[in-house]
Amino acid sequence: MSQTVITGVEVIKLNIPYKEPFVISLGVIPSATNVVIRIHTSEGLTGTGECAPFVTIVGETQETVFDYARQIGQMLKGRDPFALEDRLAEIDRAVQGNYTMKSGFDMALYDLLAQKAGLPLYRLLGGSNSREVYTDMTISIGTPEKMANDARAFKEAGFPAIKLKLGTTTAKDVARVKAVREAVGPDYPIRIDANQGWDPVTAIRTLNELAKYNIEHCEEPIPHWNNKELIRVRANSPISIMADESVFDHHDAFRLASMGACDYFNIKFSKSGGINNTLKIIAIAEAAGIKCQVGCMSETRYGLTALMHVVAARSTIVHFDMDSSMMLADDPVTGGIEYKGNGKWVLGDAPGIGADFDEEYLKDMERVTV
Ligand SMILES: [Mg+2]
């Protein structure tokens, strides 16, 4: 058996400004504050992962990720990187929650395993990379005029769908959707995301008023903890309900599926803990007849490339909200998915995740090596 061991782990803060501040019902975010994880092995391979913490949703920050990742890195030294299930179980036991931090290690370990196998990760997952993947584009909460202008611009840029951030009052949210619908015409796909901003009564009222604007689905209408009321919202909504903040890992997915609380899951590595748990969520979705969207927080093209490998291997993922890197002012990633215009992402065939961070971009960032 392999005598390969983990010889060191690097944890690097990665700060990238947004092109314009990102505004959702939970607050304003001026820049991405991510963390890069690099796992080095005794045979000279390096596995890379990216953590994209979003404090108002996951409760993790760049500081907490950096601190815990250093501790986890210390723990992993000397261990077999290819016994991925064992390593992930150890990481899971070492710290409760903190799935964004864990997702960076999960990604780096999968990157190593696929490099060792000499396969692009999607092949290791049994995929064919034959799917055409077009991301939607997200529009921050704003005035109806600003959101309508953004929507028109994104439609003209070729994106196949737009996602509107909502979650304030019925009157304001309906005015936003009305303006956008008038700007883009009757058939252009519009999705909405309330980010928990409504109470159940407001959600039911608003969703019924929005039905005439031809909405594909609505993400997380009410507070994430209220699964019981989500059942009622879904039962009284003419628009399909997608669970996002209420589905972090496979345990949440099982509970929501059992309760009949949603039509879709929105899966993000920052919530699920990475690829391993994402595959478990997808298995539950398949068993329950639930379709999935994949989404992102503030990932660069690196995190999105890792996500794309899963997309290329699982047809239960039918919606793609993979636009975070387009909102960033810089692209610090080499290799990885390529943007072909009109929302289209294309994945290559390099072994592993097949992307890396540009050392030049990282050289002035704070880092720790254990
Ligand atoms: Mg969402």
Image (cartoon, rainbow, N blue to C red):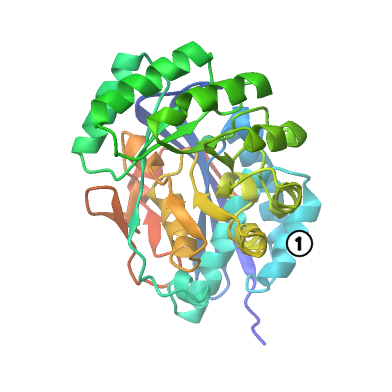
Residue under the point 80% across and 54% down? 93
Identified at 28% across, 48% down, the residue is: 343
Residue 322, placed above or below residue 335: above
Q: Quadrant of residue 142?
A: top left
Q: Give the farthest residue toward the bottom.
A: 1
The residue lying at 63 percent from left, 70 percent from top is 81
Q: Residue at x 65, y 32 (%)?
A: 233
Residue 166 in view here: no
The image shows a total of numbered marks equal to 1
Cβ of disc 1 within 8 Å of ligand 1? no
Image quadrant for the N terminus? bottom right
Looking at this view, is 271 or 141 the one in front? Answer: 141
Callout 1: SS: helix
- 162 horizontally vs 270: left or right: left
Q: Nearer the viewer, residue 301 or 323?
A: 323
Q: Amino acid at mark 1?
A: Ala
Residue 58 percent location from the top left of the image: 64, 35
Q: Is residue 180 above or below residue 328?
A: above
Name the spot of residue 53 as percent of width and height, x first.
Answer: 57, 37
Look at the picture and state if 161 lies above or below 170: below
Around disc 1, counting alpha carbons within 10 Å, would you say few (fewer than 14), some (14 to 19), or many (20 or more)?
few
Residue under numbered circle 1? 89
When asked about the image quadrant of residue 349, the answer is bottom left
Q: Residue furthest left?
A: 156
Rendering coords of residue 124 (x, y %): 51, 76
Q: Position of residue 257 (x, y in %)?
A: 70, 51
The answer to whether one can see residue 43 in this image is: yes
230 vs 180, left or right, is right
Along the line of sight, which residue is nearer the eye, 103 or 295?
Answer: 295
